[in-house]
Amino acid sequence: MPESRPRKKTDYTPPASRKPAGVGSGRWVAPTMVACWVLGLVWIIVYYLAPDLKYLSELGAWNLAVGMGFIAVGFVFATKWE
């Protein structure tokens, strides 16, 4: 019985990257993200533990907005992290 011809296989070449070289998050994104979360949490904790501090008492309940703002900025940085 005759043999069938062997198929010619080409070498595998991976598809080209979709991102251009050099695009991505910098090394500063993750530490900044964590720092914003920690700073926001510390701000809120200090406000609850020592509400009579000079600058914290002037802001009043806005201290919660400031702390949550830092945490929200941390989440914005989390979307930039790869």
Image (cartoon, rainbow, N blue to C red):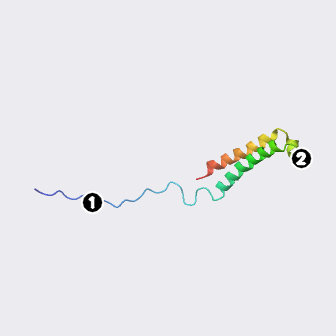
- Callout 1: SS: loop
Q: Position of residue 81 (x, y in %)?
A: 61, 52
26 with respect to 16 (left or right): right
Residue in the image at 88% along x and 43% along y: 52
In the image, what residue type sits under mark 2?
A: Lys
Q: Quadrant of the N terminus?
A: bottom left
Residue in the image at 81% along x and 40% along y: 62
Q: Quadrant of residue 57?
A: top right
22 or 43: nearer the eye? 43
Callout 1: few (<14), some (14-19), or many (20+) C-alpha neighbours within 10 Å?
Answer: few
Circle 1 residue? 8
Residue 20 against residue 53 in the figure, above or below: below
Q: Position of residue 29 (x, y in %)?
A: 65, 55
Pointer 2 or 1: first along the chain: 1
Determine the CA span between mark 2 and mark 1.
Answer: 79 Å
Circle 2 residue? 54
